[in-house]
Amino acid sequence: MALTGVLRAGFVQLRVLEMDEALAHYIDRIGLDLVDKAADGRVYLKGYNEFDRHSIVLREADAPGLDVMGFKVARESDLDAFEKRIGDFGLTIDHVAAGEQPGVGRRIGLTLPSGHRIELYAEMARSDNGPITENPDIWRDDPRGMRALGFDHCLFYGPNVAEVSRFFTEILDFGLVEKVEAPVGPIAVWLSSSTKSHEVAFVDHPEPGKFHHVAFQLESWHDVGHAADLIARYNISRDIGPTRHGITRAQTIYFFDPSGNRNEVFAGGYSYFPDHPTRVWTVDQLGKGIFYYEKELNDRFLGVVT
Amino acid sequence: MTKGFTVTLAETGAHFTCPDGARVLIAMEKQGLRHIPIGCRGGGCGTCRVFIAEGAYRTRKMSRAQVSEEQERAGYALACRLIPESDLLLRLAGDGQGV
């Protein structure tokens, strides 16, 4: 196996204000499948292209935003190795017992210098509704809504971006795929553990622990257009797009779930390999980096977070 | 004329009609107006926070990180979750510029 250690962004647990509205959005519009409504009120969802049991976890609460993002590692023994390295870096580890989320093995967790909680886990039950593996059709049931394949990545806003970048690259062995470099150091970083253009990204922001967006993978630019049609038809709260990113080169729309958590649908983007150099943007070109066609940022993209 | 209530911004005197049962920010944006900054439109971000100086209203659930119980009792609300029950006089009390 060539890909070791952290495999990918595995799940994200988000808070929503009203569960019924959230489920209509994520299931009927984004096109995720319902996995399970658990007794504690959390609801588990997945995309049709995902093998693992779930990738999106929703929890009703009095404020929207991020609870935790989980990264899947290749082997159980990786958890012990990472626990030692994380401790040596100076961050405090805690332990979440197997089964705290149904079907998920033990997790190790920590709060990043940006204020966001992440966890690592090695085991998650295989979905009984994942992609077909024997003489496979392209899907089991017609994809719904925006036809999301699955969870792609998150972007977080918080302080200490340089320290967070050093943690992901030196301790979790991520690649620094792209960055925005200011005279004071990096103010935005895109980080990958795989051949994806990123699994997680961070943008400098004074308030810790803020959630900017969760992205769902679509197959094509044509599907991004279809998603735009659904956003218009159903009056989904749109931020910006369809457009394209200079950073990652992916095609995109940003919009909001009914609780104000930003969503992205995302298609394309280049493949990353660990021997690739980091692509660097200067602050004066940030508009082109984020929105390649518009070449400028909107205030809402910069300031609106949960 | 559609049945509704007049929503007035205290700072500028700008005003618009909000149909009965509609949310203030959504009704404003539908008319192409930008008197109140627009953020997530879902009660999550605080961009469209306002202080209701005069009038009767109800709200849908709002992020407690943006409007505390004390602020809610004092007359603050997010315009995207604010439903008038009479004419309203509002002051802007939001976090950012929105668009």
Image: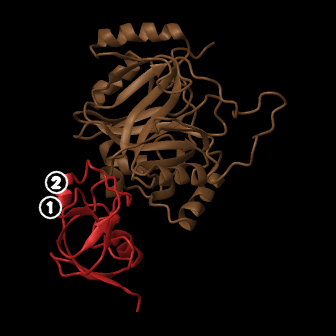
Chain colours: A brown, B red
In the rendered image of this protein, does residue A73 appear above or below residue B65?
above
Q: Which of the pair A269/A153 is nearer the observer?
A: A153
- Label 1 environment density (alpha carbons within 10 Å; few <14, some 14–19, many ≥20): few
Q: Is residue A171 left or right of residue A198?
A: left
Q: Amino acid at mark 2?
A: Glu
Q: Residue at x 21, y 58 (%)?
A: B72
Residue that numbered label 2 is attached to: B70
Q: Which of the pair A57/B98 is nearer the observer?
A: A57
Q: Residue at x 72, y 33 (%)?
A: A131
Residue A281 in the image, given as x and y percentages of width and height:
37, 39
- CA gap, disc 1 to disc 2? 6 Å
Quick one: which residue is furthest to the right in this view? A135
**Helix, strand or loop at disc 2?**
helix
Q: Residue at x 42, y 44 (%)?
A: A213
Residue A210 in the image, given as x and y percentages of width and height:
31, 40
Marks 1/2 in contact by CB < 8 Å: the verdict is: yes
Task: Answer whether residue A112 is visible to the viewer in this image.
Answer: yes
Q: Which mark is residue B74?
A: 1
In the rendered image of this protein, does residue B26 appear above or below residue A264?
below
Q: Where on the picture, by quarter, is residue A126?
A: top right
Circle count: 2
Q: Chain of mark 1?
A: B
In the rendered image of this protein, does residue A1 appear above or below residue A137?
above
Q: Amino acid at mark 1?
A: Ala
Residue A92 in the image, given as x and y percentages of width and height:
29, 16
